[in-house]
Image (cartoon, helix red, strand yellow):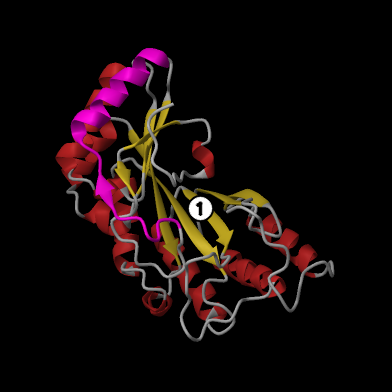
Amino acid sequence: MPKYKEPLFRPPAEADSMIFQVSHGCPHNTCCFCGMYKGIPHSIRSQEEVLAEFEEYAEIYPQTRRIFLADGDVMALPFETLRMYLDHLNTVFPFLARVNVYSNGSSILQKSASQLRELRKLKLTTLYMGLESGAQQLLDLVNKKENVRDMIKAVNLAQDEGFRCSVMILIGLGGRKFSSLHAVNTALALNAMQPRLLSALRFVEVPNTTMFDEYETLPEYDGVIELRRIISRLELNKTVFRANHTSNPVPLEGRFPHDKEKLISILTEQLESGQLDHKGPGITPLFL
C-alpha cells in the first residue's frame, strides 16, 4: 500500500478507496472536541514524492476507480497543487471515476467558482465537511474557527459547481446546556445548505481533548431526543441521511424528504423502549 504516516483517517464511505496521504495532520487543529490530530504538526508532502507514489501504485492497481486524498482538509492546498494532483491521477489511472477529500468551508471559499469548476471536471467529486453545529455560539465555545454563514455559502457554491457535499453534525456537542440551541440552529443551517449527503454522529469525548467549562455530557436518552428534534425541523429536498456510525445508539438511514416521518417514528419507538440510558452516555464504542 502507499506510504502512510499514522494516524490516518478516512470517512467510512472511503473504505474501498485507494488512499494517498498528500499531507499530514490538519491545517487548523484548534477544535477542542477533536482528538484526531492533536500533537501532530501539520505538514505537506513534497510534490515529487506524491506524484511518484501515484505512478507507482497506478502500475500495481491500474483498475482503481475511487481515490481518497488524505489528511485533514486537503481542500486547503493551493489550487495549482490540487489541479496538478488531479490531472496526474486522471493520467495514470485510466479507469478513475472520482476523487474525494475532507474540506472546511473556508477552504472551499478560497477557490473561485471557475477554479472549483475546473477541479470538478478533473473528477474531484465529494467534499466531506464538518458543520458540527449550526449554532455559532457553540462553534465559538469549542474553538472551531469557522463561521456558520460561510459554511452555508461554501456548500451552496460547491454544489452549484457539481460537487457532492457530505456534511457531518455531532449530536450532543453542546451537552445538556446547549442541546436546544444546537438542535434548532443545526436544522436551520442544514436547511440552508441542502447537502446531498448528511451524517449524524454522537459526540464522544476522547483522550487529549478538553471541552468548554459549561459542558456536561448529554445522556444517551437526551441525545436521541436531540436528534429527533433536528430531524423534525429538517426541510431537505434531496438528501441521503445516515446515522449508522458505531457511536449512535439507534442506527438510521434514509432519504429526505421521503423517509423523514419514518426516521422520526424509529427514534420515538427507541425513546419509548426503556433501553436508553437517562443518566449517562450509554455504551460508547471502543473505536471511533
Q: Is residue 234 visible?
A: no
Image quarter where the N terminus lies is: top left
Residue 96 percent across, percent down from the top left: 37, 22
Residue 255 percent across, percent down from the top left: 59, 48
Residue 135 percent across, percent down from the top left: 43, 75
Image quarter where the C terminus lies is: bottom right
Residue drawn where x is 57% and y is 71% of the image: 172
Bounds of the magenta segment: 36-62
Q: Tell me where residue 156 sits by quadrant.
A: bottom left
Residue drawn where x is 38% and y is 17% of the image: 95
Q: In this view, does 58 lie to the left or right of 235?
A: left
Relative vertical location of residue 67 with respect to residue 10 in this rendering, above or below: above
Relative vertical location of residue 221 with respect to residue 47 in this rendering, above or below: below
Q: What residue type is labelled 1?
A: Leu
Q: Does the magenta stretch include residue 129?
A: no
The residue nearer to you, when weighing 145 against 197, is 145
Relative vertical location of residue 180 with respect to residue 133 in this rendering, above or below: below
Q: What element carries label 1?
A: strand
Residue drawn where x is 47% and y is 69% of the image: 209
For label 1, the residue is 198
Q: Can residue 117 be seen in this view?
A: yes
The residue nearer to you, when weighing 179 against 38, is 38
